[in-house]
Amino acid sequence: MPVETQLQLEPAGGDERVQSVSALTALIKRLLEETLPSVWVRGELSNVRAQSSGHVYFTLKDEGASLSCAIFRNDLRRLTVQLRDGMQVVVEGKISVYPPQGKYQLIARSIVEDGVGRLQQEFERLKARLDAEGLFDAEKKREIPAMPETIGFITSPTGAAVQDFVRILKRREWRGRVVVLPVKVQGEGAAAEMVEMLRFGQDAQACGINFDLFVIGRGGGSLEDLWAFNEEPLVRAVAGCAIPIISAVGHEIDFTLCDFAADRRAETPSGAAELISSGFIDCLERVSGAVDAIDRSAESTLERCGSRLDAARDQLRILSPESAVEQAWQRIDELAIRLGSAMRAGVNERTAKLAEVRALLGRRSPEFRVRLESQKLLGLWKRLESVSPPSVLNRGFVIMRDEHGAPVARSVAVSAGQQLEAEWADGRRRVKAEG
């Protein structure tokens, strides 16, 4: 509706008709901000620029005009869309003026993809209602089996999600069975098909397969493309599924209500394959480690047994008859050596005694007796000579004599101041006894 406003210009200086640029710009800024506090604008994003400050500047345009826009850091954090050039969006914000450039601009507070606003509101409304019912409670979540043998993948059989899912499992050498339960994943009736396939997969008698795990999902797309996974009947069917289920819808930034209802969310179908195979890989690593441990234990046991066997062989060799015979021969050789030595010693002893007897017989002759007497006299003379005074002095002794020339044998026989004479081997000296 039209807005009527009267502009009141403040005069500058003495001329009431002349205004400064700053004053006029401030007036326009105040006018726009007061009269247009909130607007919704539809257009195409272009020239999207993110600054180091965290703010983002962009242009919103259509076929007839363009509008400079900015969204500040705090509001940007609340956005659920990634801004990019060419995106059709609906922007909510307020009109303002940037005085340094004299341009008006839109300060955005929220941005949604064009056509998505209604769906996003429906998404938030349904999520809040189901969450209030406790449908997404953590205590209702079940553990995903670490080693599932049979997996049911509820998805489109012609989509890239199946190919990526199987490729990851093969690359990680997962061993098991994957059964594709074909459904539509987009458009009218897609949610109903997935609900029916969930019921069918849980009935082992009807489908003939006992599934350990379900995966429900598809590749990325817009909010409209993924909307089937937000429909209430499917969300309730996922939450009430008797078999553990992983929701793998879209890309990492995409969230659906099935993600909250499932027992586990995977960012993508490829992420679901990695999650499933991680338990298998952990088991393989544990088995490999156990095999290595068994090999090491077996080698150690064989080494110990080999050592014990070698010791038993040595002991058996010692106790064997052949070894006893060898030891007996060694004993015989040793005794033979000792006998020969004893016989030689006996012969030598008898030969020595015989020589002694012959010597004694020879001593009885007159010549021997004369020689023997001469040897005795020579020995006596040598003994007498060894105790003579010159011989004693030559051995370092001293003969002490008194003033009369008589030998002094004891120190008690000497008085203080007495004159003595000391005799060595090489001469004599006068000495005086001290007190």
Image (tube, grey):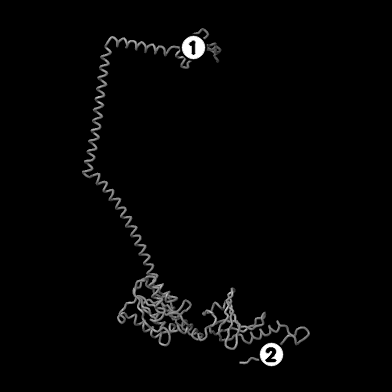
Q: Decide which of 37, 107 is in the foreground and name it.
A: 107
Q: Which mark is residue 6?
A: 2
Placement of the C terminus among the 4 image quadrants: top right
Disc 2 secondary structure class: loop
| Quadrant (top left, top right, bottom left, bottom right) of the N terminus | bottom right
The answer to whether residue 394 shows anywhere in this view is yes
- Depth order, front residue of 362/155: 362
Task: Tell me, for residue 91, which label it has, or none.
Answer: none
Q: Residue at x 46, y 12 (%)?
A: 390
Q: Which residue is found at the position 40% from the left and 73% from the top?
A: 168
The answer to which of 435 and 275 lies nearer the viewer is 275
Distance from the alpha carbon under mark 2 to that under mark 1? 161 Å
Residue drawn at (24%, 38%), measured in percent from left and top? 330
* Number of dots carrying numbers: 2
Q: Position of residue 42 (x, y in %)?
A: 56, 86
The answer to whether 181 appears left or right of 52 in the picture is left
* Of pointers 2 and 1, the one earlier in the residue sequence: 2
- State the residue position of label 1: 408
Q: Residues within 10 Å of mark 1 (few under 14, many from 20)?
A: some
